[in-house]
Each structure stands twice: as structure tokens, then as C-alpha cells.
Image (cartoon, coloured by chain):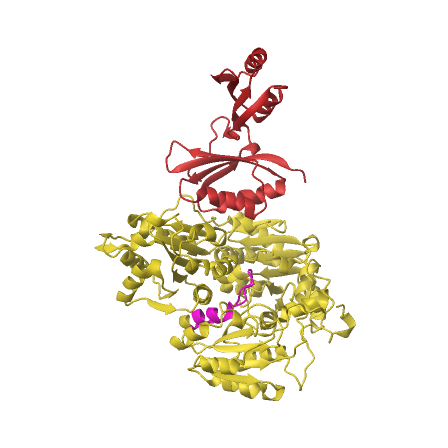
Amino acid sequence: MTEKRHIISLLVENEFGSLSRIAGLFSARGYNIHCLNVAPTNDESISRMTLVTLCNDQKINKLMKQLDKLVDVVNVKDLTEETHIEREMLLVKLKCKKNQRDEVKRLTDIFRARIIDVTDTTYTIELTGATEKILAFINSFGQIKIIEMVRSGTLGISRGIESLEVNK
Amino acid sequence: MKLSGSEIIIECLKKEGVEFIFGYPGGAVLHIYDALFKSKNIKHVLVRHEQGATHAADGYARACGKPGVVLVTSGPGITNCVTGLATAHMDSIPMIIISGQVSRQYVGSDAFQEADATGITRPVTKHNFLIDSRESIAEVFKKAFTIATTGRPGPVLIDIPKDLTDPSVKIPFDYPKKVNIRSYNPAKNDSKEKIDQAAEIICNARRPMIYTGGGVILGKAHIQLQKLVKKLGYPITSTLMGLGGYPCSDSQFLGMLGMHGTYEANMAMHDCDVLLAIGARFDDRVTGDTSKFCPSAKIIHIDVDPSSISKIIEVDLSLVGETSKILRTLNNSIDLYKKNIKTNSIKKWWGKINKWKATKCLSYKKSNKIIKPQSVIEKLYEITKGNAYVTSDVGQHQMWVAQYYKFDKPNRWINSGGLGTMGFGLPAAMGVQLAYPKSEVVCVTGEASILMCIQELATCLQYRLPIKIINLNNRYMGMVRQWQEFFYEGRYAMSYMEAIPDFTQLANSFGHVGIKIEKPSELESKMKEALSIKNRLVFVDVITDQKENVYPMIKSGQAHNEMHLSPTNKDTELA
């Protein structure tokens, strides 16, 4: 069976050990975590986690049941099963010589990114978009050297009225 | 009412109806022990090693269905519990483990006897808590008991820093009657429509088979199960954990299935066209090669845990919910479809099964020179009339009990099935004996296993627990030796037990009775003598055949119809 990318969205109790319980389940049962994001929500007792994993259909079914079984998990959903929006944020610091600055500015405009910090030798750029757009941007730099970069990991949300509810 | 953290803990346990705490004191729990000392209602059982406490609480829970409670200190106290927690977790046994933690100001500083209890036990508990305020103690206890005993049961650990148990700080106490955990909702029972669908499939079967597991016992579903099986007239088999859920001496029972299951049970599994699995989890010791598992069967699975459904074997229809409730509805549904039962096909099916039965796969070569281990279990069954609570350790002796002791009632067969924990038998028997002080409790063990928790003999003396230990002493780690004979050309690496103690003297030195049996001719009389001593622990050391193997056997990864029978079944001998 072929592996597919799944974006799993979880609401978890904002409690001691929740993150480690979920991360532990992945390692104990042999699943990979491609990226992971966790932050509080409007309800301060709950955190929302977005997690990307590569899985075949059979394995994802088992994983969803195992996640649902964890006592800290309030609700869980595989966003890739429905229409959804995904975004990721990139912060990248480039080493920019004088003669490269125009090129970087041009690329930034093409990708609708923003330059958020400048020194005589560096440009720091912010970009938001789906993962493919982030990767395309990173691949466009050519000779321009990346000093460091940081990605938020994928964030996802359902389209329309659908939502991940607190009451299952 | 204003109470200290320690007093709150004791009050919570009282409110939950806890009779026994199995534990061992230490620095971080001294405040709690002081509160316990002043309280009269709860009996504390002092074990000699924390592992013993967990197995004793586990045995207690398996025998009487109530959660077992453990109290240990921080650091080594809790790390010694890990094996016992994993054992209970694998077999879904309800337990509450209270572990002391260093005071909050020292947490994370590598303080004396500090260990990350919740971190270490996370994968081997159903859930765990680190208490961070006095005010939350009562609520956490209510949550812990709720989680441990509902849905698919399991052990829950509560880690409590010492400063929160300080006797000088008192707060108001109120134990909640109910607690709502929004993130914890055991699965609701599946609909009647789905159960009807199952009933129809079951009643239309030509070669049906019922396969049950520990879920029947944990879910207290044995009465509904017996109704169902009698109503249908179908054959039934059970996993190691499910023995006793259906009377083993009944003619419809084909014996245990799986790696050391009977020929008839495994062949019937392989050939069946409808399989009804109840409270069983398709463990690898049961299924063998999953690609050849019940190749022509429609599979229906009843289980309390949705994550067990299609975990190992894809099933055709699943009924999730409390086993006893699902079975009750199923029994009603069967009445609607009963007229469909294909009486002739079922008769033919029984004909086939009876031919398999005629193989007498559990026959073994008798001897009057050397004691055959199987004969010891048969004798035990005879003398106790099948009424004893039997605990075991892990290995050959465990399989022989499963094969030759016919449990007719649930909760009587107490063993570590999932994790396979050597050292489980003796402490588990303590828990059982405390739960049922007047009943006969026997621990069948081997000379390797018993040494893993032998220190508990002291506990048995302290609480006057008249357990009968039957030690099948073959001077080998029997099951390891058997695998080495079959799969490693008889290279017996490290499986011979050199320097074995004299068990009768060892028992004596702990203040118990020791009896040694060496000859087949004295087996019956000495066993009877041992079992007639009602008020003392008797350690019966039985010197058995060194080379006996457990048959039948399906090698790891083979199919149900690829069994190896005992050498006494010459025609079918494959090993």
C-alpha cells in the first residue's frame, strides 16, 4: 500500500505530559512525525496540535484510533480526508552581497514574501504559504547562501463551517 | 472537614471501598504511611519488593474484579514497579499505583531518590497523573479510579510530591461522587441493527467457531456467553486469558487455541466459515501466520476497545461496546434468526471436529520412573476438584496448567498472558488469597520463575497466607530449553539451572512447610498431604522429567493447520 501525507489535527488537554504522551505513541508504535506544531487556543485549557505523518491507509486508521484512545486527547481529525486549508511559515536569513540584493528583493516580491530585517550583509525574510510554495521559495535562491532558516511546520484548518469540536 | 494531603489520600481510598493496599514505605511516602497508620479501615500489606506489590494488587484485581491498589516511594520504589505495571497494562487489569515524589521544590534537581515517575511509566499505564496542588488530590483520585475501571481497564499511576502530603497543612476535603473527563469517553455500545446483522451471519454459518478472550472475564460476560453458546450449539475455543469464561469441561469447548492450543481448536479455527471473536485481541501467539489466519472465514469481532478492531486481522463486522451488554442484545437477536441455523451442516461440522478430537493431542507418555509434569497438573485438578484459584508464572508449567486444569469458572486462572512475566505467580497468589481467604489458592511455578520473586515468602508468613506452591522442578528454564531443542539444534545456552536451592529447606527457613516429591508413586499421597494443610503455606517441590516438551505446538509464524503433535501421536509427528 502506498504511503500518503496526512495532516492530523488534535485538540489536547493543556496539561503536563500531553505532548510527550502523543509523541511517545508515535515512537512506540513505529510512526514517523514529519512535522509538529502545538500552541494554545482561545480556550486556555486546550492546545491545538497539527501533525504531519506519512502513512498507508491501513496504518492511518490504526493511528487515529490509538490517538483517540489517549486520555488527554479531546478530539482528533485527519484533515486530509476533507477540504482544508494548510499554511506554513518560513523565516529565512540570507547572506546578501550588494550585487545580490536586487535579486533577493525580486524573489521576495514574486513569492509575496516580506523582508523583515536587514543588515549590511543579511536579509531576513518571512513567507507564509502551503508547503510546496515554501519549498519552491527555498529552492529559488541559487547562489545566495542561507545562513539559517526556521519553519513552523504545517498548520491546518477545515474549510467552511466544519471544525474540530471540544465535545466529541 | 479539613484534612492534610495524606489524610485526603486515605479518605479517597476509603470512599472507593479499597480493602487492601500493597506497598513498601520510603522517604517520599512517610507522611502517607503515618496517615495510614492512624486509619483502621484499610489493611496495608507489606511486600518485600515493590514488584511483588504490583503483582499482588494485580492478582487481587484479576480474582475479584476490584482495582488493586499499590503504594510505593519515589525513585527505586516506582522503578521497581515498572514490570508489574507493564504486566497489568498488557492484560488490561485495573490498578491504582500511588507513588511518592520528591517535594516540588526539588523536582528536576536530581534529588535523592528522584525519578521521573510519570515519564517512565507513561507507556505502561492507561494514564498517569503528577499532582501539582493539594486542592486537586481528591479530583485526581476520582479520575484515576474512573479511568482504571471503565472502558478497557488498565493501571493508572498517581505521582504525588512529598510536600503536598505534609500533615501540618490542612484544607477542606470533599470527594466528588462523579467526575467528568471530557477527553475520556469509553466507546458507546454499537446499535441493535449492527448486532442483528451479526446474528444473521452467525445463524447462517455452516462451519462456525467462537473464539473468546480475557475480555469476557474482564467484562463479566461469562453468563451471557454461556447462554449464547448453548443456544447456538456451536464449538467454542478460548485464549490463554479467556480460560474459565466458558466451562472448560463442557463438551462444546474445544480447549485453548494458539501456539500450544489443542489440535481440534486450531484446525476448527483454520476451517471455519464464520468466526465470532469476543473480547480477544488476535495476539500473535493465537493467530500464528496472520496471512493464513481463518482463510475462509467471515470474522465478527466484539470488543470494548475500538483500537483493537482490525488492528491485526481485518474483520468483516465489528461490534464495539461492553461485552456483556453486546452479548445480551446478541442473544435476543439470535432468537430472531435461530430458524436459519443449518442443523445438518452444523452436525457435519461437529463430525469433522470430533475426528480431530480423536487425535487426543494432549496425550503424553506416562511413566512410573519419572514424574511427568502433565500428571502433576492432572492430579492437582483431581484433588482440588477444579475449584482452586490457580496462579502461574511463565513457561512450560503455565501452558500445562492451561491445557490440563479445566477451569469452569471465570477469575480462577491468574497468569501473565500478554507480557509473560516470570515472578508473577507467587505475589499474585498473595493478592488472590487476601481477596478470598477461605478459598484454595495454588501457585503453579517452575524452579526458574519462583526465584524471581521468592522474597515474597516472607510476606506470606507475615499475613499467614496458606498458599500452595507447586514447583515443577526440571532443573531447566523449560520453555527456553524446548525452543533450543527445536530451533537451535539442542544448544542449551544458559537454560540449565545450576545451583538450585533446596526448596524444602528454603521454605522451612521462611517459616513454611516444604515437601519434596521425587517418585511418581508418591505423587498422589504427597500432593494430597500438601493440600490438606489448610492453615500454612506449603512449598511442594516436584522433581519432574527434564526433557518433557509442551505439545501440540505451532512454530512462530506458522498457520493453525501446521501443528506439531506430541511424539505419542506417531502418525502425525512433524517436529
From the viewer's perspective, is residue B318 above or below residue A163? below
Between B290 and B468, the one lying in front of the other is B468
Residue B573 image-quadrant placement:
bottom right
- Looking at the image, which is closer to me, B458 or B356? B458
Q: Quadrant of residue B243?
A: bottom right
| Image hue for chain A | red
At 51% across and 64% down in the image, what residue appears? B222
Q: Give the answer, above or below, for where B262 lies relative to B193.
A: below
Instruction: Determine the residue positioned at 57% across, 23% down.
Output: A146
Vertical relation: B33 (above or below) B173: below
**Number of marks present in the image shown:** 0
Region rendered in magenta: B415-433
> Residue at horizontal 68%, vertical 59%?
B272
As for residue B141 lying within the magenta part, the answer is no
Q: Position of residue B529 (x, y in %)?
A: 50, 87
Q: Nearer the viewer, residue B519 or B50?
A: B50
Q: Position of residue A136 (x, y in %)?
A: 61, 22
Image colour assigned to chain B: yellow
Q: Is residue B177 visible?
A: no
Is residue B275 something one can see in this rendering? Answer: yes
Magenta-span inclusion, residue B432: yes
